[in-house]
């Protein structure tokens, strides 16, 4: 019961953070792996995805009710992400992800520096593209992020937000809303794979899902109440934590 209470609390906090800027996996994944150190990793990852898809879906619905979601960008990106997430998951079973593990901290440092230097980045919602250009860019970025999420995963939500802000001209709040739609597609693709292969602890996953939903509702309300500057600040905090976590993981892997 203590273990389940711990994981429920971790899922709540993960849902809250993930609803605002992504990166909930930073909290939820270490928690579930620490409580079940002898469980098959694929089963824990599948259980994590089961919880995450409920939290992310709740966040997407809440954003949809209160923020004008750029569906013309989000939908093609989500479809491409869904399809390519399968390809990424298949690829990781045949190609080691070590080179991505080593490169990720460097990419995240560049993301943090760029966001910090561009003080006005994401403060104004001024979409730059429409029509065919919007469709092609959304599909291309969605495919790339979907493949990455299936292949490796950490920082997917944060990368999506930056892409929507930098290349589509969204403010951070609108970018976070659109990112949730794409995240749902990525999580659903992964969940189908893990469910098909039997790598799920259903009871635990549903408990964590309920806690994620509550956390995501709180997170979306905080984001909507405090606006894009709040999302930007939390985005930077999560990216820095991702840098520390992925840097440590890459260093540990290299030493071994």
Image: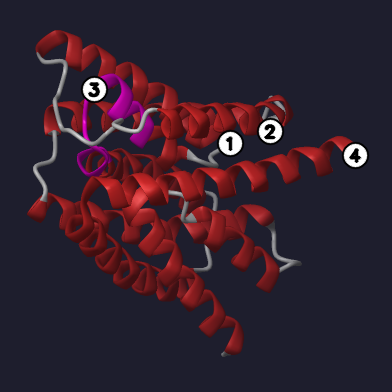
Position of residue 43 measured from the top left corner of the image (x, y, whole percent)? 60, 58
Residue sitting at 56 percent across and 45 percent down?
A: 240
Q: Residue furthest right?
A: 256
Name the spot of residue 69 as percent of width and height, x first. 13, 40
2 vs 102: above or below: below
Instruction: Give the residue number, with chain letter if any, for mark 3.
Output: 168
> In this rendering, would 26 be left or right of 230?
right
Give the CA separation, mark 2 to mark 3. 27 Å
Residue 34, compared with residue 240, is above or below; it is below
Q: Which mark is residue 101?
A: 2
Q: Earlier in the sequence, mark 2 or mark 3?
A: 2
Other residues around mark 3 within 10 Å, as few (<14) / some (14–19) / many (≥20): many
- Name the image quarter holding the N terminus: bottom right
Residue at 66% over, 26% down = 103
**Which badge, 1 or 4, is on the more N-terminal residue?**
1
Where the C terminus falls, by quadrant? top right
Q: Quadrant of residue 170?
A: top left
Residue 177 inside the magenta-drawn segment: no
Q: Is residue 216 visible?
A: yes
Q: Where in the figure is residue 177, as x and y percent of width and height?
A: 23, 44
Furthest residue toward bottom: 1
Q: Which residue is mark 4?
A: 255
Mark 2 and mark 3 in contact? Answer it, CB < 8 Å.
no
- Closer mark to the observer between disc 2 and disc 3: 3
């Amino acid at each position: 019961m203590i273990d389940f209470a711990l994981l429920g609390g971790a899922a709540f906090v993960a849902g809250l953070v993930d609803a605002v800027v992504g990166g909930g996996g930073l909290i939820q994944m270490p928690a579930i792996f620490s409580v079940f150190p002898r469980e098959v990793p694929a089963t824990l990852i599948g259980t994590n995805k089961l919880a995450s898809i409920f939290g992310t879906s709740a966040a997407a619905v809440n954003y949809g009710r209160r923020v004008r979601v750029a569906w013309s960008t989000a939908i093609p990106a989500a479809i491409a992400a869904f399809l390519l997430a399968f390809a990424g998951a298949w690829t990781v079973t045949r190609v080691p992800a070590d080179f991505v593990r080593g490169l990720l901290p460097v990419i995240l440092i560049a993301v943090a520096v760029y966001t910090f230097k561009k003080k006005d980045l994401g403060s104004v919602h001024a979409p730059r593209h429409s029509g065919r250009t919007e469709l092609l860019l959304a599909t291309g970025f969605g495919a790339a992020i979907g493949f990455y999420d299936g292949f490796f995963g950490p920082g997917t939500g944060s990368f999506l937000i930056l892409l929507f802000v930098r290349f589509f001209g969204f403010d951070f709040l609108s970018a976070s809303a659109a990112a949730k739609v794409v995240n749902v597609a990525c999580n659903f693709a992964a969940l189908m794979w893990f469910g098909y292969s039997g790598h799920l602890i259903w009871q635990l996953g549903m408990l964590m899902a309920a806690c994620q939903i509550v956390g995501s509702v709180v997170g979306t309300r905080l984001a909507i109440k405090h606006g894009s500057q709040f999302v930007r600040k939390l985005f930077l905090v999560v990216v820095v934590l991702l840098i520390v976590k992925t840097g440590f993981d890459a260093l540990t892997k290299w030493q071994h």
